[in-house]
Amino acid sequence: MLRLGPQLLTPSPAPDADGFISRSLDSPPPALWRCCFGRTRAVRPAFRRAGRSPTAVLTPERAVEREMSGGGMEREYDAIVIGSGIGGLVAATQLAAKGAKVLVLEKYVIPGGSSGYYERDGFTFDVGSSVMFGFSDKGNLNLITQALEAVGHKMQVIPDPTTVHFHLPGELSVRVHRGYNEFIAELINKFPHDKEGIHQFYNECWKIFNALNSLELKSLEEPLYLFGQFFKKPLECLTLAYYLPQNAGDIARKFIKDPQLLSFIDAECFIVTTVNALQTPMINASMVLCDRHFGGINYPIGGVGGIAKALANGLVDKGSNILYKANVTSIILNNGKAVGVRLSDGREFFATTVISNATRWDTFGKLVKMDDLPEEEKNFQRIYVKAPSFLSIHMGVKATVLPPDTDCHHFILEDDWANLEKPYGSIFLSVPTVLDSSLAPEGHHILHIFTTSCIEDWKGLGSKEYEKKKELVADKIISRLERQLFPGLKSSIVLKEVGTPKTHRRFLARDNGTYGPMPRRVPKGLLGLPFNTTAIDGLYCVGDSCFPGQGVIAVAFSGIMCAHRVAADIGLEKRSPILDAALLRFLGWLRTIA
């Protein structure tokens, strides 16, 4: 759900003149983030810098050097990926597994973006969410498992028995158990008069989930795949097409009458999309509301940051490259086609295709230098605005302050349902040490606390005012948790770091620190979200501002779709140019009616 970033970087080995860091294979990783919260190719040099012969390929824990023939570096890349969030890494590794030569350029010293991690005083903090979908060993929506397997990696995980424990107005307390029947029984116990409606709504979710889970998931912009799936699974495809323009709140209201229960479903959607159920596409809601029971929430041993590290290592194992401290400032266009990127230090890298893991606002507002936005990007910005950012508090506390039966994830909205979407109105809390005690020193726990916050609330402050406000706002949030869940919390704190929207904007390179796109008005389901291709030839987007939207499982899906479409365009997958053009025109038209 949540996207956070470091406030500053701790010291790491100094880069050489080209920005590469020398490190032996068995040396420890660099100090990490400190968070206050068939195949035709255009052959061209991928990177050229006089006087350098080896290319250094960095992973968080090793550097691999490959000598290039000749006097300088010259490499042809099939794809350059800007950013190493989960969406970008999944796209990169899927392409590398298909045989493509990929270069990932990451601004910071470790991969992962909002799915990264940092270490402080013996604590290992997840930068963002600890609620990990897509890690099961069954079905087709276990997208993180699939992405890791594609590059020969697997992670050990710990099953989470409770997805989230809701603490809501009117003293409503609901645990979302891993077992579906247990969850439904608890919900019916709270709302016995809506028993039938509860079954009907969640059965609709399962209908969609089962249809999705039965399909091989690839690019919806590739017609040969699309037609193949339709002929294999026509009913499932028609089911998804039927629900594509619908929202969860509208469907819930067909079956459920109790206002408090409808508000609970709003909260269910909010923790994934930051909007209520009326604005949450039904397909997105169904993926999350069902996968938590089908595959379950599974926490990777050692922390969420291990996912990105494993993908980065797998990318290198497949012969592709990832470079850190590589700050892309512009996408290079040649006759209207994306052909490469330029870094802040002046280096230029070239490839047949460019994939941006930045938001569409950052991609078309900062990286692409154009006099006028493409029409489809104007349409996207007419439908979607930037969702607010977050205030983050990462704390180490004495273990004695937490009851022994504490759940890993909590959502707190104390007094008024109307505060659900307001800044600081609700609180999301993760306690990952409940599942993996190795993340903290003995006798301690980790608390990750997140609440909605707008960047406008942090502008125009001097440095002292800024720090004072951070402490004041954080103190109020902690006081609320102390009252609701953990008496004595403040006195148990041994480490506290606070991040604001300005933190997230700076270190995640996300415009205003935004969580992602949020509809301006009630949307027509997923119709308005663009896919991976763009109006610029050779340029693709991946991540949460592409179909199907926000969340770990959604951005992983985006990465898989993007890799398939790019692979077809560079000759690694079958394609039909005539059908491609017709399908892309049709999908573009659909977005105009959203």
Image (cartoon, rainbow, N blue to C red):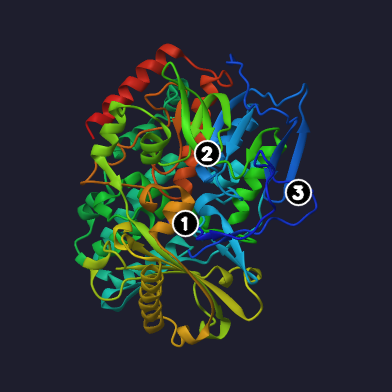
Q: Amino acid at mark 2?
A: Ser
**As rendered, which of 351 and 98 lies closer to the eye?**
351
Image quadrant holding the N terminus, namely: bottom left
The image shows residue 193 at horizontal and vertical percentages of 23, 68
State how far apart marks 2 and 1 are (Cα): 41 Å
Indicate which disc, 2 or 1, sits on the residue closer to the N terminus.
Answer: 1
The image shows residue 465 at horizontal and vertical percentages of 36, 70
Circle 2 SS class: loop
Quadrant housing residue 210: top left
**As rendered, which of 405 and 147 lies closer to the eye?**
147
| Left or right position of 83 against 285 | right
The image shows residue 438 at horizontal and vertical percentages of 66, 69
| Left or right position of 355 against 428 | right
The image shows residue 539 at horizontal and vertical percentages of 45, 27
Do tag 3 and tag 2 residues touch (Cβ < 8 Å)?
no
Residue pointed to by mark 2:
344
Residue 292, labelled with which disc? 1
Mark 2 or mark 1: which is in front? 2
Mark 1 or mark 3: which is in front? 3
Residue appearing at x 32%, y 51% in the figure:
387
State how far apart marks 1 and 3 are (Cα): 40 Å
Q: Is residue 126 above or below residue 556?
A: below
Do tag 2 and tag 1 residues touch (Cβ < 8 Å)?
no
| Left or right position of 73 against 195 | right
Residue pointed to by mark 3:
23
Q: Is residue 547 visible?
A: no
Marker count (numbered): 3
Image quadrant holding the C terminus, namely: top left
Q: Residues within 10 Å of mark 3 (few under 14, many from 20)?
A: some
